[in-house]
Amino acid sequence: METKALGLLLAAVLSLSAQTLGPIARDGRYWVQQETGEIERGSRLRVSATGAVVIDGHDASHFEYRVTRRVKADSEDEARAIFERSQLTAARLGPTATLTMEEQACARCAFSAELEVRAPRAIQEAIVGARGEVRIHGVAGRVITDSAGGAMEIGDIGGSVRATTAGGSIALGVIGGEVRCDTAGGTISVEATRGDATLASSAGSIKVGTIGGSLRAETAAGDVSAARVEGRVIAGTSGGSISIGQAGGPVNAESAGGSIEVAFAPKGVRVETAGGRIRLHDVAGHVYAANATGDIQAVFLAGAPLQDSLLEANVGTIVVYLPPDVRMAIEATVDFAKGLNRIESEFTDIQVTQTSETAGMGGLHASGALNGGGPVLRMRNTNGRIQIRKRQ
């Protein structure tokens, strides 16, 4: 039984149908050698490489590869010895084609290797582990890739993408499924996905085009921007601004020191910043905005369902634009005001009164029911202004 099982295993592993090892050539201070080959058929690809990896999908049933090795050495014989210790193993186990490059440890030889693969476009899965740059295009299935320290460029993928790098940028083109990206030191950009996107960077900006599902984008040092998100948005940055275009679901955005802008969010908004400005346009649902040191501007969407909302600031100006026919109750407060003009309203149903006198600076309160009242919009400003205007 053991002999039969071993025979089945060996039959499942298919060696290269063609393999060519090129000559060693001099290139400046380096010695260079190329190796090419093919692996017949296979619906999956697994790559483990010591350097950069490039994968391009093409209309064929087999895999073609080329590896280019470079090394600094005093002689051709020395270079050959190093190349022999960095062999590429290529095989097929069942439906999976595998390419494995052994890591070459040499302190001063500056060894590098780039692996290029032309893979069948129809493969169901590509799993890539590398120690350098990764570029993958034209794969119908899902992609999972991990780099120890290189940039990534991935596009024209039919399935989901999972990309992780310890130091480099991640650039995604059009992706047919869910996306998860994580970089410890670079930017992230996404052109379009048909699924959810979860993006995280420890030191770079995040820029998104169109997301077919929900978006979660967080960075420790950079801006976050998204043009269009069909679902919910969760965005956070410790040192930059946040800009959200159209959002089909609720928006939750927080910055420790930058501006926040939302262009269209009818399902609700919750935003907070410690510095910068807040600009909300065409918002509805539950709206919450808090700004420690800057202005807040909120333009409410006409004809959209509203819920109880709150806008808070310590200094600066809170400006709201409300549709003339909106059904809403208004409660506005300025804690320290030099005059009644610290609260201004273009609606005659809103009355402004002075509530207290503290060290020569009285508090102001304004309230009123617009068109019979409805959900309550509360505005609080410690030492600034509140303006309530009619949307044209």
Image (tube, grey):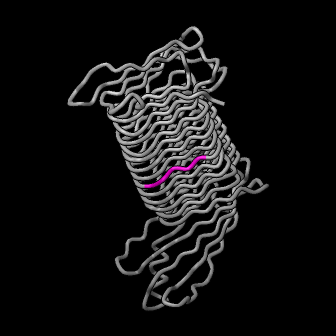
Relative placement, left or right, of 11 versus 374 is right
Observer-nearest of 270 and 135: 270
Work out whether residue 95 can be spotted.
no
Residue at 61% of width from left, 54% of height from top?
154
| Image quadrant in which the C terminus is located | top right
Q: Is residue 25 visible?
A: yes
Q: Residue furthest left?
A: 359
Above/below status of 109 relative to 368: below
> Relative to residue 275, is residue 150 depicted above or below?
below
| Residue 273 quadrant | top left
In reply to whether residue 245 is colored magenta, the answer given is no
Tell me residue 386's x, y (percent): 44, 31
Q: Position of residue 359 (x, y in %)?
A: 20, 30
Up/down of 3 relative to 332, above or below:
below
Residue under the image location 55 percent in, 37 percent down: 215
What is the magenta range?
204-208
Residue at (23%, 30%) from the top-left corner? 360
Magenta span main SS = strand
Residue at 51%, 61% in the rendered image: 151
Residue 116 falls left or right of residue 296:
right
